[in-house]
Image (cartoon, rainbow, N blue to C red):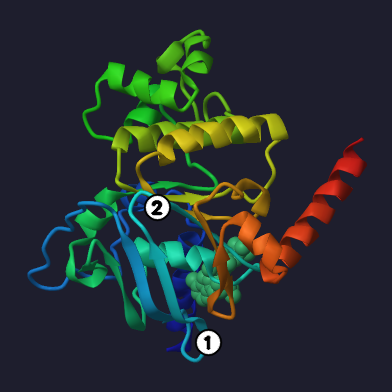
Amino acid sequence: LLQLFRPLNMLGWVYRSIKQGLIDMEQMFSLLDTPAEIEDVPGAGPLIVDEGHIRFESVRFAYEDGRDILCGLDLDVPAGSSVAIVGPSGAGKSTLARLLYRFYEPTAGRITIDGQELREVTQESLRAAIGIVPQDTVLFNDTIGYNIGYGRDGAAQDEIEAAAEGAAINSFIAELPDGYETKVGERGLKLSGGEKQRVAIARTLLKDPPILILDEATSALDSRTEDAIQSTLSNVMRKRTTLVIAHRLSTVTDADQIVVLDGGKVAERGTHDELLAKGGLYADLWARQAAERALEQAAAE
Ligand code: ATP
């Protein structure tokens, strides 16, 4: 029996590891045709987003019994605002995003969008309402036009181009010899990290969701690319409720609210200036990352 269980366990592990990456989850569902572990409750209705107000109320969550990652977390993301989630590595930042997308369910407490509890609505409607700009965008071995158009079924060429314009990648594409017909991916033109991120931003603009999850890249893009990406991201975030999963603090100083996770709870919250003035955990993390940046710069010179 053990012999039989080992490969099954292994499969489960691979499956969970893939899921863990919070890579483009929408894409993964259609690529792998992964059956969702979570099922809709009988009679679940569609989520109706009027404003996009997100609330986590006393949320507890554990991947494994006995090891709580979140222990009674309260979080309020007002409609149309941006909230950055920061905290030490392993604090549960990405876990929050996975719960919002309902890859997993809280073991206690609830999450609501405009007052509707996530477990009461269909997953399809929930996922249609949320756009994700992942850390690492997976590209199909197809044309760049297809890769952007994937954001919305049946998008017309002029809509694809408008989205590319919004993501500041239109002129790059226009200069390619085959334009939007250029093949990309493993067997085509390789795009840089910044270009792939723009493709993800263009897809999201096409999808036009009221709620956005940005999973910030862990690895530093060069500062010019990063500034350019930041300004296109501000374009996407306008008028949407945005949860930013931030691994580096330098990219979230403009967020309406910064929430610091520690020990499974919200340890601090406020704007960048308020949190620095407080001299607590955020100020410590900021000082540490500033020192690391200075070291990296010195090494590069
Ligand atoms: P980082 O900034 O390093 O990406 P994070 O704050 O986003 O970290 P999470 O990815 O949310 O952290 O993980 C929180 C904790 O849950 C970590 O201790 C991690 O090891 C654990 N964890 C994450 N995914 C799983 C999983 N699928 N199964 C079991 N444990 C997991």
Residue reaching furthest left? 43
Along the line of sight, the residue nearer the viewer: 21 or 226:
226
Residue 31 location in percent, x, y?
35, 47
Please give the name of the residue rendered at 45% of the width and 12% of the height, measured from the top-left corner.
179
Q: Is residue 177 left or right of residue 124?
A: right
Along the line of sight, the residue nearer the viewer: 265 or 139:
265
Residue count near mark 1 (Cα–Cα under 10 Å), binned few <14, some 14–19, many ≥20: few
Please give the name of the residue rendered at 57% of the width and 29% of the height, measured from the top-left corner.
191
Snapshot quadrant of residue 123:
bottom left
* In this view, the mark in front (1 or 2): 1
Q: Which mark is residue 67?
A: 1
Residue 88 location in percent, x, y?
66, 68
Q: Is residue 58 left or right of residue 208?
A: right
Q: Is mark 1 within 8 Å of ligand 1?
A: yes
Please give the name of the residue rendered at 35% of the width and 76% of the height, measured from the top-left corner.
57
Name the residue that disc number 2 marks. Answer: 25
**Secondary structure beneath label 1:** loop
Q: Quick check: 61 above or below 289?
A: below
Q: Amino acid at mark 1?
A: Arg
Please give the name of the residue rendered at 54% of the width and 45% of the height, measured from the top-left corner.
136
Q: Is mark 2 within 8 Å of ligand 1?
A: no
Quadrant hosting ligand 1: bottom right
Along the line of sight, the residue nearer the viewer: 128 or 109:
109
Query: Total label count?
Result: 2
Q: Quick check: 230 above or below 283?
A: above
Are the residues tagged 1 and 2 within 8 Å (C-beta)? no
Q: Is residue 49 visible?
A: yes
Residue reaching furthest bottom? 66
Q: Quick check: 167 above or below 132?
A: above
Residue 257 location in percent, x, y?
51, 57
